Amino acid sequence: MEKEREVSPSSTPEVVRKEDITYGDLTRILEEARDIYSTHEGLTFLLDKRQEAIAILMEVAGDKIKGILSTGYPNYQLPDISLPDATTALTKEQFIPIAEIQSHIGTKLDFIKDRNPKEKWPCLHCRAAVEQTPLRSREHGCTSSMTPFALFTAIPDIDLYIVVESFEDAEDIIRTYETAGLNVPENQMQESLKKFPAVLNIDPQFVLKKDIMKALHEIVEGSGDWRKIPLPLLVHHGKPEMKQINHLGLDFAFSMIDHTIPDPELKEVFVQARMQLIQNKGLDTIVNDMKETSSSTELPRRIGRLIEDHPHLEARLRARLAQYATQGTGS
């Protein structure tokens, strides 16, 4: 997690305009985020918001979308892959807050606790901050207690893998964001913060159908470490950019949910990959392999630590994996 440079609070804040974001706004946003992550109502709120975003995407670009998948929170809280409506996905009695998330948000609140709440947050109008260029140096003149990147790691958004035939299709979908009512933080940071949580940011990662089909095959049939499967992505953080994750197997087994896969070929490959992973590796081996990442130098350690630190998450993981062997998919 990003460590911020401490900055002395301003004693004479600048004149703040209506369109500015203040440190008081940031405190309100982080406290709202903490409430969302710490309650059952917050979990169902996130599930509902995600379903709304997926429905919009399918309405405006369904002809170009081969599949929509998701990973991360709140997926790993759920004991069932069948994706019932949000109100029944998890009961209040089953809900347990994730201590790591609460601690992370608390750290961000500590960054700004000594700032004047009426003081303007300088990052909103700073292109270097938005584009995540190196700006945490005194030479740059940065006076912020928290960069946008650090802030957005602490507040919930809608993370999706959108499978397409070509990256040209992905760029067509990207152009529909604003007209479709979907919010990308780098393009609409002021609106996404002022209206949070009524407006949640969408953070889609576009994947080529041929690439994810190849990666799913490697998870199941490859001779190497099933956790270390690469997948090229097109992300759009203010501008299109190619990236690659190197741990698709981990995400696939831990928390990936298929919301809709209208492409029959991709759907069949996805279903078979789930079933074969469990049948080939065995449930205990898969869980133990994920736990081992808690001290890995090559793989993200967060998944292993979540499983080790939260017994209820391991129990729900085992329940989901057991379903994979018989159901394949929840779509």
Image: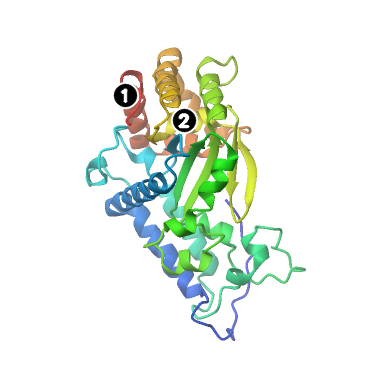
Instruction: Say what secondary structure mark 2 lies in.
Output: helix
Left or right of residue 16: residue 7: right
Q: Is residue 182 visible?
A: no
* Above or below, 105 relative to 263: below
Q: Nearer the viewer, residue 147 or 97?
A: 147
Query: Label 1 belongs to which residue?
Result: 323
Please tell me in which quadrant of the rendered image residue 32 appears: bottom left
Q: Nearer the viewer, residue 264 or 89?
A: 264
Residue under the image location 65 percent in, 57 percent down: 132
Its colouring scheme is rainbow
Residue under the image location 50 percent in, 59 percent down: 107
* Of callouts 2 and 1, the N-terminal one: 2
Around disc 2, counting alpha carbons within 10 Å, would you say few (fewer than 14), some (14 to 19), or many (20 or more)? Answer: some
Please tell me in which quadrant of the rendered image residue 115 appears: bottom right
| Amino acid type at image mark 2 | Phe
Picture coordinates of residue 155 (x, y %)?
Answer: 45, 57
Picture coordinates of residue 246 (x, y %)?
Answer: 60, 32
* Above or below, 238 relative to 288: below
The residue furthest front is 63
Q: Nearer the viewer, residue 305 or 258?
A: 258
* Above or below, 229 relative to 10: above
Tell me the tag on residue 78.
Answer: none
Query: Label 2 belongs to which residue?
Result: 252
Picture coordinates of residue 4 (x, y %)?
Answer: 61, 61
| Amino acid type at image mark 1 | Gln
